[in-house]
Amino acid sequence: MIQLDALTVCLPGFTVQDISLQVAAGEFFALLGPTGSGKTVILEAIAGLVKVTQGKIRVDGRDLTHLPPERRRIGIVYQDYALFPHLTVMENICFGLRYHGIDMVEGQQRIDHLIDLLELSRIVQRKPLHLSGGEKQRVCLARALSVNPQVLLLDEPLSALDPNFRDGIRRALKDLHRELGITFMMVTHDFNEALCLADRVGVIREGVMEQVGTTEEVFEQPATPFVANFVGMKNIFEGSFAHGLAEFGGLNCSLPTANSGRYLALRPEDIVLSKAPLPDADCQVFSGEIAKIVPLGFVHEISVRCQQTEFVTYLDRKNLFKRGFEVGDAVMLGFDPAAAHVF
């Protein structure tokens, strides 16, 4: 459905470089990366809002590279809503029909369905000033979908919302995608959003694509240290790997297979701590000392130094106090070697 061939966009002081990507028809694809990595530039290039320097953009086989936005059949939803403040909800939703040559009767039928699907019927005569963040985002979705696009682009659709509204919009996005069957492409800096919504993801850094794959592949088998850190593998160690043995930071670890690579990565949730010996014979165990305990809301981040290596793990507040862990405590740290990812 969406095909980017060596897409390059040059802006003052920044370049999105040589992006090649395919998104299947009906797929929910998420483009991930930190702020300033080029995610929105790619989205706006697909929508026709920024000029392409080099490369091609095709949607459903049609070359859109130099077409104006209104001829692309692409809807876009921004994080800051961009609703017209002087128009009602209904007027905002209907606004684009006149510019896309859509029959008003057919368009109104589609809008009525979207209003029902997004539960907007009780607010159609209100103006944006009197709407909550979640309601504004639903109106934006209805407006973008009212013109019957082939593709819906979503620019950080949840980032501006209060946490109380995020679950509702997330469910609305899943319902819309399932009901309408059109191609969704979302940009976000939050991997949790991608895990909840996307079939596949691409991770971009400083205008260059680092990895593309299913959410499960990227989550479990990151290709670079940057991707590993981005998807939550906080423990990333450079070392040597040969004959099923990993050596890093003064430690030796037996691996279940003879992996080769340069880095070993481990998720914090795959690490267990204990003041007593760990009984699991299949567990890789190191002795260490708690270096830091940092509260992160409902969980605490615990750093444990073992030789020249510092591991990071998480523990909820209740278990932290129950086990009586404090900075300076001697502990045993363990993990299943099968949970370690070598790349």
Image (cartoon, grey):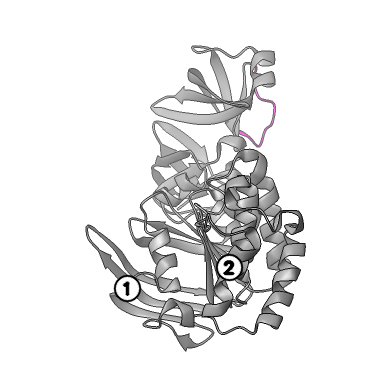
Q: Is residue 181 magenta?
A: no
Q: Is residue 337 visible?
A: yes
- Examine the rendered structure and indicate whether residue 335 appears above or below residue 330: below
- Find residue 51 and name its label: 1
Residue 304's spot in the image, x, y percent?
Answer: 49, 23
Q: Which residue does the image show at 50% across and 13% down from the upper left? A: 327
Q: Which residue does the image show at 44% across and 32% down from the upper left? A: 251
Q: Identify the secondary structure beneath mark 1.
A: loop
- Give whichever of discs 2 and 1 has the lower sequence position: 1
Q: Amino acid at mark 2?
A: Ala
Towards the viewer: 234 or 195: 195
Residue 160's spot in the image, x, y percent?
Answer: 53, 45
Q: Identify the secondary structure beneath mark 2.
A: helix
2 or 1: mark nearer the eye: 2
Residue 162's spot in the image, x, y percent?
Answer: 60, 40
Towards the viewer: 60 or 127: 127
Q: CA distance from mark 2 to mark 1?
A: 21 Å
Look at the magenta stretch and give its main secondary structure. loop
Which residue position holds label 2?
Answer: 144
Q: Is residue 282 magenta?
A: yes
Residue 21's spot in the image, x, y percent?
Answer: 46, 73
Rate crowding at label 1 as few (under 14), some (14 to 19) or many (20 or more) other CA atoms within 10 Å. Answer: some
Magenta segment: 276-284
- Left or right: where does residue 68 sit relative to residue 115? left
